[in-house]
Image (cartoon, rainbow, N blue to C red):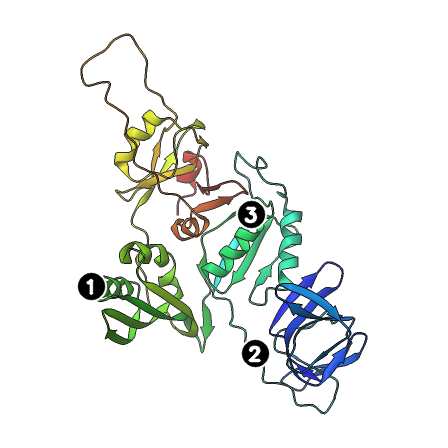
Amino acid sequence: FRMQPATLAYDNYLGRMAIGRVTEGKIGSNKQVLIKKENGEMRSGKTSKVFTFQGLKRLEVEEVTSGDIVAIAGIPDIYVGETITTDENAEPLPAIRVDPPTLAMYFMVNNSPFAGREGKYVTSRHIRARLEKELETNVGLKIEMPNDSDVFKVYGRGEMHLAVLIESMRREGFELQVSQPEVIMQEIEGKKQEPIESAVVNVPDEMSGAIIDALNRRRGEMKNMNSENGTTTLEYDVPTRGLLGFRSQFIVMTKGSGTLYHSFDHFAPYKGEIEKRTAGSLISGEGGAAMAYSLWKLQERGPLFITPTVEVYEGMIIGEHTKGTDLVVNCTKNKQLTNMRASGTDAAITLITPIEMTLEKAIEYIQNDEYVEVTPKNIRLRKKYLNENERKRNKG
């Protein structure tokens, strides 16, 4: 018998489970097995239960045979790419390589003024237990968990990888705040090296120029370009840093008609500085409910992220300031009602539809002095230091 786990699953009663296709032979429950690594290391184990799949359902069976897609329970330390066999002379199967993490984010206990209002699991103990459980099955994830801290550093293989974990936790009732993703640099042969991703872009011909310009500004290097039937295919090597925040910009630039695929390719020498977000933030200087009159006056400063009646707190980011600097504003001020009337003062309040801040957009948007507050009901942006004086004191 030989099989190699392609992925892992976790069951609260059975523990870690190896999922993959049986390459040869057959096996049942309660059988002694050997686990081999590519380097020849070997250890023993025992299967407790074996399962096959029917659609999305897992079915327990007495025996599985060659060609079956199976789940095997009972080996608590099994890992992707190892070979499970019953013959100590069997050759280990070629190892499956798991890409190293390229991004890191800090997961923290939510400490905003609205903390604990919407979430079911809000403490560092809850977050720690959930991340430890995720490590059982998420093979590309690494986590640093200091014993006396409520801040956890989570390493993943890209924005999407980390966003899926945050979204899963949010739907389960967790409340937390996360920092801006940072790229993991490596020291190779005494030189600073950064992860490079291979990107394949398909766009209509008339949009290719703008996309080439955008990728070049993000330190991308074109490898190939091909135009056929009105569609241009571009192949690029782009630093992971350059792709942070690019997805939402790409959707706007192509009006949803382009496709973008990228995956980690290799490490290369540091490519230099990349232009960051040029817009600043509109920051609420007061707590309370946002008023339509205030938002109407503020929308000329830049796009807004909130609607009238939304609860805000001091230090919460309510919009974008197009002039590039952070601006503290009061969005809770209402129009003064008096008996005096003058022509032109009763103009109709017309609000532009605000930008809906999804989790992915929020992670892409924030800068290093900002956090995303994630709760089961809301995604909010906030400054690291909520008070304006504190921000000035800690600037730089």
Residue at (69%, 73%) from the top-left corner? 78
Looking at the image, residue 64 lies above or below residue 230: below
Helix, strand or loop at disc 2?
A: loop
Q: Quadrant of the N terminus?
A: bottom right
State the residue at coordinates (20%, 13%): 342
Please report contact status of discs 1 and 3: CB closer than 8 Å, yes or no: no
Residue type, mark 2 in image: Ile
Q: CA distance from mark 1 to mark 2?
A: 41 Å
- Viewer-nearest residue: 53 or 144: 53
Which residue corresponds to mark 1?
206
Q: Is residue 331 left or right of residue 68?
A: left
Report the front residue among 99 and 353.
353
Identity, as a three-letter code, of the amino acid under mark 1: Glu
- Binning the other alpha carbons within 10 Å of mark 3 as few (below 14), some (14 to 19) or many (20 upward) gives many
Rendered position, 2 above or below 147:
below
Residue that lies at the very extreme toward the bottom in this rendered image:
89
Circle count: 3
User: Which disc, if any, is residue 170?
Assistant: 3
Left or right: 213, with 281 as reference point: left
Residue 306 image position (x, y, % from top left): 39, 36
| Residue 367: assigned label | none
Q: Which residue is mark 2?
A: 96
Tell me the quarter of the picture where residue 355 sits: top left
